Amino acid sequence: MLTFDTKECISTIWEKIKKAGLLTGGSGSIHSLLADQNGSRIFEEYAYPYNSSKMHRMFSITKSFTSLAIGFLIEEGKLALDDRIVTFFPEYEPEDGFHPYLSNMTIQDMLCMQTCHTSTTYQFHGNLNWVRSFFVTPPSHRSGKVFKYDTSSAHTLAALVKKLSGVGVLDYLRTKIPAEYLFSKDAYIIKDPFGDEIGGSGLMCYPEDLLIVGRFVMNELLKDAAKEDIATAFGKGKSGDFLKEAVSFKTPNVQTGQVTDERQGYGYMFWRIRGGFCMYGMGGQYVLFYPQYNLVIVTTADLQNIKGGTQPLLDIIHDTLLDYASDFEKYEKSIYDTLKVKPKYSKLYHIYKIHENSSDFESVRLGYKSENESGCGEGDAKGLLAIKQKSSGGSIDYVIPFDFHKEAEGKLPLIDPKTMRLLSDTTGEVPFVSKACWISEDTLYIELGLVGEEVGSIHITLNISDTNLTVQMKKVVEARFEDFNGFFEGEP
């Protein structure tokens, strides 16, 4: 196992947190920092008013605990990754049956945050049972295609744990995790208004509990681990080993993440980070794993009021590890290097008819050629995406050239929001540069950087097949391109 002066490294992290003004005790502050290496606690500090005897809300770290419980159910043979979630909740089936997008959703889809919903479903329903909301909210796209964070997925899986085991998530884990790794009896999960555990964000426990469970996870991963597993920080995972699969790169999320460490990939309700992986809860709750050093770091915090969210904290930890561990850099890979995958289709030309949608998009034309062929007809670009939209003046064509090795240039038309017609003067176009990459063998990601007055970006993800197209769009622009948000389905 690789070593360095870890105690001094973690102490330096704590000092840097102080110097950054993140120990104020109010909003925008770190509450605790703990670390364990090789099974020994090497650091533990708290900031007033927090201490080792005060419980803390751990938010979405709850999802990782739920994932661990699902893994044990699979180990028991009570569940399989390819089981469909609707088969366990027939009581929520509508009179006209489950929507096909929902009925095809698997347990694995839910763990990977590849559900058919745009966001957390119980937020859309004031007085509806939270679990029921997952099954009756109209879906927006096919499951298992693209990453979209969905807390109701974890909430529903926690309900499934209770249904299959007869007890809640933590009580079930207490029967499966060896005694030496058991978290405190005080730990609990807050319940929703209908009596179900909030399996996506309700965990209440001591910071020490996270360190103990983190050590259990690390020891399980390192048990009989081959050197190449440790060297790649479980970058690929092994088939049939749930925990190794859970912490591995399963789902690309570069298209939705807003900060560096939220773009490194996703496993089974575990996040990938630079040089490792983690459990992550809103506001700065972290269990950070660095298998190459047998190191677990825990933080609790309230950074919800900090610009950039938790990234400043992760940058302090990351940069300090770089300073102390001379080999740390080799465990980091550019996310675009990680995403260098061979596409399923070496070249493609398809026109897809888009299903009815609120943005009135009618069709998508997608074409690209392999590297050793000439361009697509739009300058030297290798590919072309054209989206047709209905308008009061006829139709609008958004033409987007792209390339896999360099930036391509183009212009997007603007429409007058009052007349819904194209602006015809020189202010009616927005220049952009685009770059594209494959984030899986059948999923293309195109990022547009807008230039000029409309500084911002548009992110388009296309899951491609001969029979279907799933499009995910996100715009980060102040007051334009409102239609470039959400999901769209189509077919040739």
Image (tube, helix red, strand yellow):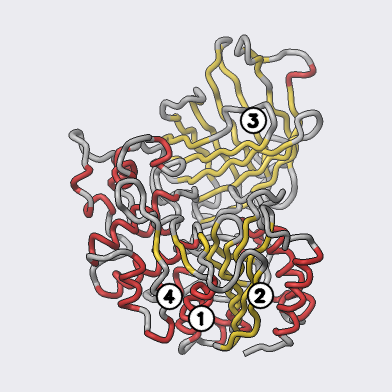
Closer to the chain start, of discs 4 and 2, is 2
Determine the secondary structure under disc 1: helix
Residue 232 in sight here: no
Cβ atoms under marks 1 and 2 closer than 8 Å: no
Identify the mark at residue 291; answer none if there is no mark. Answer: none
Please name the residue that numbered disc 4 is placed on: 184
- Pinpoint residue 50: horizontal percent, then vertical percent: 61, 66
Query: Residue at horizontal 31%, vertical 38%?
Result: 128
Residue at position x 43%, y 36% in the image: 489
Three-letter amino acid code of the residue under disc 4 = Ser
Q: How many marks?
A: 4
Decide: few, some or many residues near mark 2? Use Cα within 10 Å; few <14, some 14-19, many ≥20. Answer: some
Given residues 94 and 196, the one toward you in this image is 196
Amino acid beneath label 3: Val
Upstream in sequence: badge 1 or badge 4: 4
Amino acid type, callout 2 = Glu
Which of discs 1 and 2 lies nearer the camera? The answer is: 2
Label annotation for residue 45:
2
| Label annotation for residue 399 | 3
Q: Find out whether the residues at labels 1 and 3 contact each other: C-beta distance under 8 Å.
A: no
- Callout 4–callout 3 Cβ contact below 8 Å: no
Give the answer, above or below, for where 389 lies relative to 1. Answer: above
In percent of width and height, residue 320 lies at: 76, 73
Which numbered disc flags the more N-terminal residue, 1 or 3?
A: 1
92 over 195 or under it: above or below: above
Observer-side mark, 4 or 3, equals: 4
Question: Residue under circle 1?
Answer: 215
In contact (CB < 8 Å): disc 2 and disc 3: no
Circles 4 and 2 in contact, beta carbons < 8 Å: no
Q: Position of residue 469 (x, y in %)?
A: 45, 40
Where's the C terminus, which quadrant?
top left
